[in-house]
Amino acid sequence: MGSRSSHAARIPDVDSLRRETGFSQASLRRLYDRFQALDRTGKGYLSRLDLQQIGALAVNPLGDRIIDSFFPDGSLRLDFPGFVRVLAHFRPVDEEEEGNRDPKEPEPLNSRMNKLRFAFQLYDLDRDGKISRHEMLQALRLMVGVQVTEEQLESIADRTVQEADEDGDGAVSFLEFAKSLEKMNIEQKMSIRILK
Amino acid sequence: MDGTELAGQILYTWLTLVFGLILLPSAFGVSLGISEIYMKILVKTLEVSPWSDAALPPRSALAGAGRGTRGIIQRDESPMEKGLSGLRGRDFELSDVFYFSKKGLEAIVEDEVTQRFSSEELVSWNLLTRTNVNFQYVSPRLTAVWVLGVIVRYCVLLPLRLTLAFIGISLFVIGTTLVGQLPRNRLKNLLSELVHLTCCRICVRALSGTIHYHNRQYRPQKGGICVANHTSPIDVLILTTDGCYTMVGQVHGGLMGIIQRAMVKACPHVWFERSEMKDRHLVIKRLKEHIAHKKELPILIFPEGTCINNTSVMMFKKGSFEIGGTIHPVAIKYNPQFGDAFWNSSKYNIVSYLLRVMTSWAIVCDVWYMPPMTREEGEDAVQFANRVKSAIAVQGGLTELPWDGGLKRAKVKDAFKEEQQKNYSKMIVGNGSLKSELD
């Protein structure tokens, strides 16, 4: 039978995870329960297949890319710290926390820059720090499927790259990406609030 | 010598008690009221007791909003257009990727389907360790009650239930084999019904089952098809206690296989080989033949195809609705406070599942029979299936989900992804901004 009470003590390295991700104890517990629920066969880690079986994710046009962001550098196993680190990017920004932050500490995972970096790497497949026209086309193709012709897609891609590209190298670097979105309310668009 | 004699005496008294108080009355469909008294005590202890309040979770306020609607993240359910509105309106932008990534990560943190394949969380603890998920503080007094509960469940109830189950199944196999020797006539049918009903009642007592049947005037008639939501193999037991059905299913090996072969001798059930199950047309043809006579017992089918955790109803497979004939929907809702009936087949095999059920307090459920439905003009099988599904969901107080229960094993169809892609394309291409580019 066994007890299923998932006390915080059962989560490995819970204190260092709290510091690193900024999640509260209760949120970490909820995420740990979720991690275990997704790990259907009880392996202790998640594989790509476990995430692919989430229906709502499989129908998401960017589903595969999102799954890729959990498995950096070709790794095949996702442990709980890795799971939580990616989710930490979407933690809502706490105003108070921002003010009190010690500038010597590394940037929190849910800062504006890190949220932008997360979005950037959904486009930048080869991780060269730039979104080339080709990568833009690929991402667009994922989002529209077979609904749009090649020409239309190419013109959209060209326009977007042109608008964001400042140094004229035909690709969008991370800084150009961040600049083109500086007026956007990233904090609200890329935040998921976990209810206690 | 004395030891074995004593043991023999105890066993003898035990069996006589069991026979007299439980088996005989089951044969006549009469209840002596012992289980009612047990249920009353149980209800008093679990639902009204002051000490169980000490173990209420901090989220009890949210929980009151209704089972199955609790979410762990704040959801923004605005449609794609609103979620994608960027700096410039509706053209493609670099930021569009935010919307999809947010939706994707929301799905990873919480999705409608996966949570349906784990047991429902309870509002207040029912003194079973297995449901103690987020009740952290357990006082010494509560622990004492819990220990008492464990003793009662494992030392008193479990042996009793195992004995009953053993007797019930053996009687069933022997009874149906004996009845099977008779030629096909009315006497055979009567006897077969008697054997079925008696043994099912015994097995239900083996689980301490309390079943409330509602609207018995709509009980499925001969020549019809009975359709119900599926939570566990016990569903079959619960429905068969109130009437005989023709079962449909795959031939299994082991104990199930023995039971299946015995059943088929007394009463014509429809069992398929594994290879035959893949051929949909063959299955439908055989079922059509079965109901053509209108004199056979109603067929029992679970169109979801898999066990769901009893908080929702998932997609009904259209196959059962293509056979024709009258559909008699039945809604089954278990009360999780007394015992969780959901079979999580990826987590537990059938034996550990049955042991868990037998060491719960009881299985309490409501069965609603509903008025028969037939396919209307111009309605195809899928629409009919959805109509029946909604009716069952409303009656049983369950949420309705369009997803396929088979999702827990297989990947979702691409058609759904194409829907999303279509919506998005319409937005960025169809609004005329592109035309200005091409001019």
Image (spheres, rainbow, N blue to C red):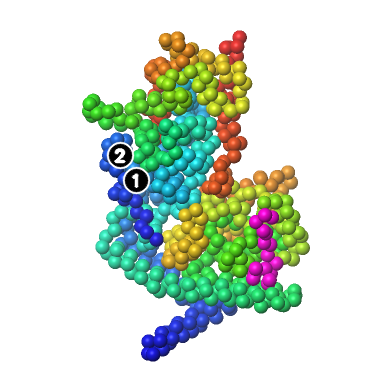
- The spot of residue B66 in percent (x, y) is 44, 50
- The spot of residue A137 in percent (x, y) is 54, 21
Against B402, residue B215 (above or below) is: below
The local crowd at label 2, few if under 14, some if 14 to 19, many if 20 or more residues have their Cα within 10 Å, is: many
The local crowd at label 1, few if under 14, some if 14 to 19, many if 20 or more residues have their Cα within 10 Å, is: many
Left or right: B305 as drawn, with respect to B138: right
Q: Amino acid at mark 2?
A: Leu
* Position of the N terminus of chain A by quadrant: bottom left
- The spot of residue A141 in percent (x, y) is 56, 25
Against A62, residue B231 (above or below) is: below
Determine which of the numbered discs, if any, sits on residue B186 in the image.
none
Q: Which residues are magenta?
A: B261-276
- Residue drawn 42% across the image and 53% down it: B121
Residue B205, visible in the rendered structure: no
Q: Nearer the viewer, residue B244 or A135?
A: A135
Against B362, residue B95 (above or below) is: above
- The spot of residue B337 in percent (x, y) is 43, 60
Left or right: B398 as drawn, with respect to B289: left
* Position of the C terminus of chain A by quadrant: top left
Left or right: A167 as drawn, with respect to A61: left
- Residue drawn 45% across the image and 11% down it: A169
In the rendered structure, which disc, 2 or 1, sits on the residue that comes first in sequence? 2
Q: Amino acid at mark 1?
A: Arg
Dot 1 falls on a residue whose secondary structure is helix
* Residue receiving disc 2: A17
Dot 2 falls on a residue whose secondary structure is helix
* Residue receiving disc 1: A29
- Residue drawn 57% across the image and 70% down it: B200
